[in-house]
Image: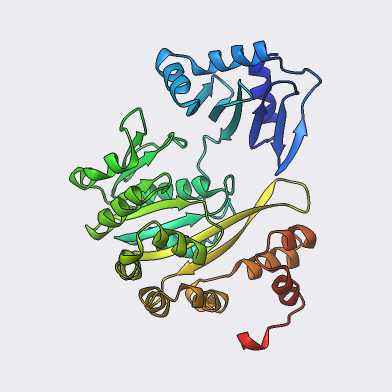
């Protein structure tokens, strides 16, 4: 199998992901759906050869053998840049390679809520979180935010990533990008001394544990503007997940910190376009207004959703309104939108223009 040709096909088909595993043909994710490529079945021996060629050096091979899994960036010359996750399944290597676009697109090009994101980009301090399942466009959206700041503001931006995906060039801002296990051993280690590097903006690739969350809160309290991602589905679940990182006796303190530090939560879900030309995001936007801050401070996060539903004046929007808007604009199919709604019953009421009595 010509691996270079496979990577070239990823670009030509505008696939987001490539899947290689033994005893099957290569597969691609195109506009969210899995497609097969060719009729060549990958053998165990061939998969080992592919893995060995992509690992490239002894350091990567040692990390893979020790951890039985590795994330890294592979650059295929004259073709593209790919984020590779290599792992073991049934005793043999397998991998998923995601195409990382070299150009960083604007909010408008990505069909993101540009007014809210532009406003958040002007914040001097605080915490902003982008949420959604894997492959929902979180990293792409944050890259767009950082590039917006880079083009318009004189800042020092420090990114801590695993691995580095988008490459930035210094414009009005200076951007230092650090990669886990290459430039720094872990997120907490990177954040331990980051405030001594005089950052204005800190991007943390992903918050997965209490140590990283605690370090992110500390950096925010010291005056930095911190941006990160969570694998959660909406704002309410994100707040709950953050608090549950900590033991119960600290919950009240964490709610208090979030009420003063958090600026907004943007949640994303990608849907196939009705015209078949790629995917388009649906989004929920929660802006921390005084009322939302009070509810967070009091630990009443489950009471926030109605304020997101009715917070258009402050730039807020719920998923159901975003999904219904995409359907009414003719951009996505109603069935695809319904499948991605938090509540299919509420989606059906919203698309019919009916509001629950309890919401009035």
State which quadrant residue 82 falls in: top right
Q: Residue furthest left?
A: 196
Asked if residue 71 lies left or right of residue 211, the reply is: right
Give 181 or 248, whichever is nearer the viewer. Answer: 248
At 64% from the left edge and 70% from the top edge, which residue is drawn? 321
Query: In this view, which residue lies farthest toward the right?
Result: 39
Residue 82, visible in the rendered structure: no
* Residue at screen point 39% across, 56% down: 245
Q: Quadrant of residue 334?
A: bottom right
**Is 174 situated above or below 182?**
below
Residue 4 in the image, given as x and y percentages of width and height: 63, 17
The location of residue 63, given as percent across then percent down, is 42, 22
Placement of the N terminus among the 4 image quadrants: top right
Residue 100 spot, x, y in % from top left: 54, 35
- Snapshot colouring: rainbow
Whether 159 is drawn above or below 223: the answer is above
Residue drawn where x is 35% and y is 66% of the image: 251
- The vertical placement of 252 against 20, above or below, is below
Q: Position of residue 179 (x, y in %)?
A: 37, 33
């Amino acid at each position: 199998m010509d691996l270079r040709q496979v990577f070239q096909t990823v670009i030509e088909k505008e696939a987001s992901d490539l899947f290689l595993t033994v005893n099957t043909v290569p597969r691609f994710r195109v506009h969210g759906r899995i497609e097969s490529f060719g009729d060549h079945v990958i053998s165990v021996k061939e998969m080992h050869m592919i893995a060995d060629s992509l690992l490239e050096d002894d350091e990567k091979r040692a990390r893979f053998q020790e951890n039985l899994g590795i994330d890294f960036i592979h650059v295929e010359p004259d073709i593209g840049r790919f984020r590779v996750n290599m792992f073991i399944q049934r005793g043999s290597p397998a991998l998923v390679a995601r195409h990382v676009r070299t150009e960083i697109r604007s909010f408008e090009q990505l069909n993101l809520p540009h007014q809210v994101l532009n406003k958040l980009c002007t914040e001097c301090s605080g915490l902003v979180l982008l949420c959604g399942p894997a492959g929902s466009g979180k990293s792409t959206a944050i890259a767009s935010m950082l590039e917006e700041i880079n083009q318009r503001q004189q800042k020092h931006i420090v990114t801590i990533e695993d691995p580095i995906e988008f490459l930035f060039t210094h414009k009005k801002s200076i951007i230092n990008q650090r990669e886990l296990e290459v430039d720094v051993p872990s997120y907490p280690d990177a954040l331990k001394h980051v405030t001594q590097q005089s950052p204005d903006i800190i991007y943390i690739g992903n918050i997965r544990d209490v140590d990283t969350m605690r370090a992110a809160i500390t950096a925010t309290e010291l005056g930095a503007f911190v941006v990160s991602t969570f694998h959660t589905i909406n704002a309410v679940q994100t707040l709950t997940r953050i608090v549950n990182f900590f033991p119960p006796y600290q919950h009240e303190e964490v709610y208090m910190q979030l009420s003063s530090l958090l600026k907004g939560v943007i949640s994303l879900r990608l849907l196939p376009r009705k015209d078949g030309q790629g995917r388009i995001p649906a989004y929920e936007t929660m802006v921390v207004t005084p009322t939302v801050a009070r509810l967070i401070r009091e630990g009443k996060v489950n009471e926030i959703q109605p304020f997101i539903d009715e917070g258009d004046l402050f730039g807020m929007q719920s998923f159901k309104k975003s999904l219904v808007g995409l359907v009414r604009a003719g951009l996505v199919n109603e069935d695809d939108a319904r499948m991605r709604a938090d509540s299919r019953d509420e989606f059906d009421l919203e698309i019919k223009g009916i509001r629950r009595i309890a919401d009035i």
